[in-house]
Image (tube, rainbow, N blue to C red):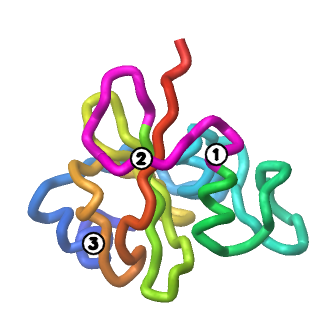
Amino acid sequence: MSGEEIEKAFPNLQITGYSITSPATLEYNCIAWAAGESQSWWEPDPLSLYYWPSNTPRQYTAEAYKKAYENIGYAVCNNPAYEEGFEKIAIYIDIHGKPTHAARQLISGNWTSKLGQLEDIEHVALDDIAGQYYGSVGVIMKRPKEK
């Protein structure tokens, strides 16, 4: 996807800026990328065709996605601001309550997002990619950084 196409899909990026940080790939998706994984596609599909953390319901619900991240050490928090010593993620939810996207905070305080099967981008704020495709941030989670 070209920068022009990304900006058309996510017009807020034109205001705050962003950078494309990797080429498009089918290897992983945003849910995996937020978890720090770039070798598998994470999805709670009922046929178990994709990776999904064990002991996690294979459902397309906010609760199932929260549980998936809880299984790797994340806990719900209320503040998306950068905190020294923690990794944060954001789960986006559409108007029907279905999870649509996840982003991970970088040490700079910016966020990184994998755009479906397309590129990864670095963006300044969570609202930069909110809107018609991803909805809005529904859950913020954090875990202590590994030393």
Residue 43 coordinates in the image, percent (x, y):
71, 63
Query: Which-is-in-front pick, marks 3 and 2?
Result: 2
Residue 62 coordinates in the image, percent (x, y):
58, 68
Residue 109 versus residue 65: which sits nearer the camera?
65
Amino acid at the residue labelled 3:
Phe
- In primary-sequence order, the first of circles 3 and 2 is 3
Mark 1: secondary structure: helix
* Residue annotated with mark 2: 77
Residue farthest along the right direction in this orientation? 47
Structural distance between the alpha carbons of marks 2 and 1: 12 Å
**The magenta segment:** 69-87
Q: Is residue 80 above or below residue 98?
A: above
Label 1: few (<14), some or many (≥20) within 10 Å?
Answer: some
Q: In this view, does 58 lie above or below 146?
A: below
Label 3: few (<14), some or many (≥20) within 10 Å?
Answer: some
Q: Do the residues labelled 3 and 2 touch (CB within 8 Å)?
A: no
* Residue annotated with mark 3: 10
Residue 1 versus residue 28: which sits nearer the camera?
28
Residue farthest along the top direction in this orientation? 147
- In primary-sequence order, the first of circles 1 and 3 is 3
Task: Choose top left, top right, bottom left or bottom right for residue 71.
Answer: top right
- Where the N terminus falls, by quadrant? bottom left
Q: Which residue is drawn at 46% across and 73% down?
A: 93
* Residue annotated with mark 1: 70
Label 2: few (<14), some or many (≥20) within 10 Å?
Answer: some
Q: Which residue is drawn at 24% across and 70% down?
A: 7
